[in-house]
Image (cartoon, rainbow, N blue to C red):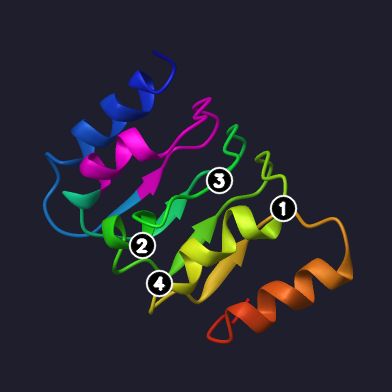
Amino acid sequence: SVASGAAAKLRALQQQEGLVDVNLELCNIEDIEPLLPLLKKLTFRNLTLFGNKLQSLPPAFAEACPELQELNLESNEFPALSDFVPALVALPNLKHLVVTVTSPEQRMKIAEALPGLVS
């Protein structure tokens, strides 16, 4: 499957001790759900999901990334804010979010939903 490359990257990161940066840029990920058990085994604050084909983030996303501070969701295929923002609300430490928005209104709605964001 397409996500097998991403899964292999995550398994390789498990060999590292301590904190890691998780970079799943351009891995053709359409659904993050199958990767959540692997993400859960890692300790990380930064996650890059740039340039994938994600259309939503499941509620369980926050459980898999409790320490997450920086998230890059740029250049994915989310149809609406409601397809990913609710999952991010449950991330207590999220400070930095990079995401493709189509209007200033969208950026404002994200800021309202995630008041802890610094950038």
Q: Is residue 24 magenta?
A: yes
Residue at figure coordinates x 79%, y 67% from the top left: 106
For disc 1, the marked residue is 80
Q: Residue at x 39, y 13 (%)?
A: 1
Task: Give the residue furthest to the top.
Answer: 1
Q: Which residue is mark 3?
A: 56
**Does the magenta portion include 98?**
no
- Circle 3 Cα neighbour tier, 10 Å, few/some/many (<14 / 14–19 / ≥20): many
**Residue 5 relative to residue 37: left or right:** right
Measured as percent of width and height from the top left, residue 53 is found at 60, 32
Mark 2 touching mark 4, by CB under 8 A?
yes
Relative to 109, is 97 above or below?
above
Examine the image and state in which quarter residue 16 appears. top left
Q: CA distance from mark 2 to mark 4?
A: 5 Å
Residue where numbered disc 2 is placed: 62
Give residue 3's position: percent from left, percent from top. 40, 23
Distance of mark 2 from mark 3, alpha carbons?
A: 13 Å
Tag nearer the camera, 1 or 2: 1
Q: Nearer the viewer, mark 1 or mark 4?
A: 1
Which secondary structure lies at badge 2? Answer: helix
Name the residue: 55% across, 30% down.
Answer: 26
Label 1 environment density (alpha carbons within 10 Å; few <14, some 14–19, many ≥20): few
Label 4 belongs to which residue?
Answer: 91
Give me the residue at 57% from left, 38% from top.
54
- Which comes sooner in the sequence, label 1 or label 2? 2
Q: Which residues are magenta?
A: 22-39
Lower sequence index among marks 1 and 3 = 3
Which part of the image, by quadrant, shows the C terminus?
Answer: bottom right
Q: Which amino acid, mark 1?
A: Ala
The amino acid type, in three-letter code, at marker 3 is Ser
Q: Say whether residue 25 is left or right of residue 61.
A: right
Given contact means CB atoms under 8 Å apart, are the residues at marks 1 and 3 in contact? no
